Amino acid sequence: MIRVLGIDPGTILLGYGIVEGPATPRLIQCGVVKASARHPVELRLCELFEGVTDLIVSFNPDEVAIEEPFFGVNVKSAFTVGRAQSVAILAAARSGVPVSYYSPAEVKRQVSGYGRGDKAQVRTMVMLQLGLKELDQKTDATDALAVALCHLQTREAARRLAVEK
């Protein structure tokens, strides 16, 4: 059994999802770490760092999986999200927890079977895989759960391939 902390980085809302698996993945906790939009970016990053560190201390994940920023049309936005990603990486590294990275397309492909799936498809598949009838959470938390599930599935596939060799 492995416990994974999935993170969907953002500089105001950083989504997190904690699951155990790989066989029959189980939801442990999900939500968002909130930073004040009124604070300058450096204080928001401190709030996020403390929030992720608290999650690691409270839930003791074996591994952390982080979604990489999407470099679409808005490069400035991607750089901003990259700051939040770096804070999460630092919190994991300081806690000695290994980190893996997944692009948005990898997460969608692994969780919903289609790399260009929309948020509703991903949400539905997250709920199905975790056996949930409802998921009353912000999109950021749902996305973080998808990242954690993606990591569990990728890790399990790699383990099976290694056994077959």
Image (spheres, rainbow, N blue to C red):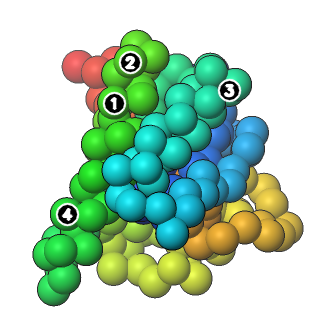
Report crowding for label 4: few under 14, some 14 to 19, many 20 or more residues within 10 A (C-alpha): some
Identify the secondary structure beneath mark 3: helix
CB under 8 Å between discs 3 and 4: no
Question: Residue 23 location, x and y as percent?
Answer: 64, 34
Amino acid at dot 2: Arg
Mark sitting earlier along the chain (1/3): 3
Residue pointed to by mark 4: 79
Callout in the foreground (3, 4): 4
* Marks 1/4: CA–CA distance: 16 Å
Instruction: State yes or no: discs 2 and 1 in contact (Cβ < 8 Å).
Output: yes
| Circle nearer the N terminus (2, 3) | 3
Residue topped by disc 2: 94
Foreground tag (2 vs 3): 2
Mark 3 Cα within 10 Å, few/some/many (few <14, many 20+)?
some
Which residue in the structure is indicated by mark 3?
59
Alpha carbon of mark 4 to alpha carbon of mark 2: how far? 22 Å
Residue type pointed to by label 4? Phe
Mark 3 → mark 4, Cα distance in angstroms: 29 Å
Q: Is residue 148 left or right of residue 30?
A: left
Q: Residue 70: where, in percent of width, then height?
A: 24, 69
- Residue pictured at 51% horizontal, 69% vertical: 38
Quickly name the residue at label 1. 90
Question: Dot 1, crowdedness within 10 Å: few (<14), some or many (≥20)?
Answer: some
Which badge, 1 or 4, is on the more N-terminal residue? Answer: 4
Spot occupied by residue 77 in the image (x, y as percentages of width and height): 25, 74
| Residue 137 place in picture, x, y as percent | 72, 67
Name, please, the residue furthest toward the right. Answer: 133
The label on residue 105 is none
